[in-house]
Image (cartoon, helix red, strand yellow):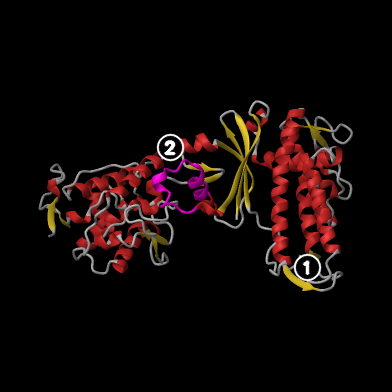
Amino acid sequence: MDNFHRLIELNSQKEQKNKYQFFNWRSELYDANDNTYFLLAKFALLNKLKIEQINEFFNQYFFIDIYNLNLSGHRSLKYFFSIFSNKAYIQNNLITKSSDHLNILGIPLIQDYYVNTRHQEKTIRYCPECIKSYRLPEHASLKYLDRCLFHNVSFEIFSCNHQAIRLNERSVKCYIKFMRIICPDFPSAQTEIHNVPNQFFTALHDLDEWNFSLKEICDKKLGKHLHTFKNVDNRAPELCAHFILVKELSLPESLREFVIQSNAIRKITTLSISESSIFSCFKNFTYFQFCALPVVYASFCYLHRKNEASFIQSLLSFFDELKSKLMNKNENFWYLHENDGMWTSSDSRNLYCGVLIHDLLIDWLTEMWLPPLYTGTRSRRLKYFNYFNLMNEELVKSNTFIPIKSNISENQLDALYNFHKGQFREVSMPNFSSKQILALDSMCDVLVNSYIDDARAWLDRIECGEKPNHFPPKSQSLLTLQKVKNHYYLINVQFD
């Protein structure tokens, strides 16, 4: 049965000259675990109010702007609905503003409730069982969950067209549209009672505590992110972060069956680089200096430590492997037309309209790792070596490399730009100890082998009949440098 309320029951200080505003609500429509915007949608449909009227109502009487709900606004609205449902207000940790967003190996992950529940995307996730009793649990907004904690069924997705909805009205309007389509009989009394088996309350309690502690767990296990050397190309970053979060961040056992499956992660390896005191320079490194370090260091190793640096040997061995495969191949040669990005298959080894796929891979890895061997047109060489010299300049500024006196002045680096016809020229050398050299070798080993694995897997698929449609090969690994307590680690997350 409907209950009509006067606002004087809520706030006697807000006396109006003429009469008090009436509104309609039913206590069974309130659930402490409901999404806040879903509660507003039910309120709007029950009272047959437009979005402007709802906002005016809550602004005038409760000073709540539903267009821009913050943490306090969410709590106030839930408190409001609990009072008029004659139920206790229960605050859980899902409605919590984190002091900082999570950083999962360099991937930012927003955990704030009022950001996650705002309808900024084109879909609403809901439980097909909960919705029968007009419930939309707020944990449906957590994308690392795959199933409803109350019914253990997969979430379904409702798509909402944003084109006809103004930006500031989307959050509520999309939920109103959702209600009208999924629950066409609303506001008729629901046909099913919302009963939650006791065993599922354990999962909800554990989610509450775990979600509240995620920042602390993340900092303890993954540490501070310093640099991402290699990203994953074939998966959305947020999805990768959710996979890692579920697999690595001490997920409670009671939640295992409800979260997304992390089978997409083939392997996670952690390489200990060194104690932070050995590479104290890293704390002041810029993004560009981290990018420059492997390239300039690899160049030095090729020229002076070719036999000692195993990652250089891995590169050269892979080049020999590619050349051998090409020599033993008699048909189905793939060429890339660099001008238009088109691919051509031919049984001729000497087609002059493109670059052979094996040569493409060698040139790609050479450009990334072996500047002394880089070849190309004169304009490309000038651009490439100027950029290489900027890398040297930045590393010299960090004192991790020192200029070679025969090639560059100690006080100025103008000579870096004066290459003769775009030819390689060594201008700096590492200023590292033997311990640091060994640590950098280990780090470059992992990086190089990851790129080789990507290239080999891509080429194998093409040799098995798949038509190439992109270049370079897509990365299957996420490689990041992390500082955990007083130690540096290179974390390698390999995806299938």
The amino acid type of the residue labelled 2 equals: Ser
Q: Is residue 331 above or below residue 442?
A: below
Q: Quadrant of the N terminus?
A: bottom left
Residue 478: percent from the left, percent from the top? 61, 48
Foreground pick, 242 / 378: 242
Quadrant in the rendering for residue 131: bottom left
Q: Residue at x 27, y 63 (%)?
A: 132
Q: Decide: few, some or many residues near mark 2? Use Cα within 10 Å; few <14, some 14-19, many ≥20.
A: few
| Distance from Cα at disc 1 to Cα at disc 2 | 52 Å
Residue 374: percent from the left, percent from the top? 83, 51
Q: Decide: few, some or many residues near mark 1? Use Cα within 10 Å; few <14, some 14-19, many ≥20.
A: many
Q: Is residue 160 left or right of residue 336?
A: left
Q: Residue at x 31, y 42 (%)?
A: 92
Write down the region rendered in magenta: 241-261
Q: Is residue 208 left or right of residue 242?
A: left
Provide the secondary structure element on which disc 1 rests.
strand
Q: Residue furthest left?
A: 18
Instruction: Name the residue that disc number 2 marks.
Output: 99
The number of numbered badges drawn on the structure is 2
Quadrant in the rendering for residue 169: bottom left
- Residue 335 got which mark? 1
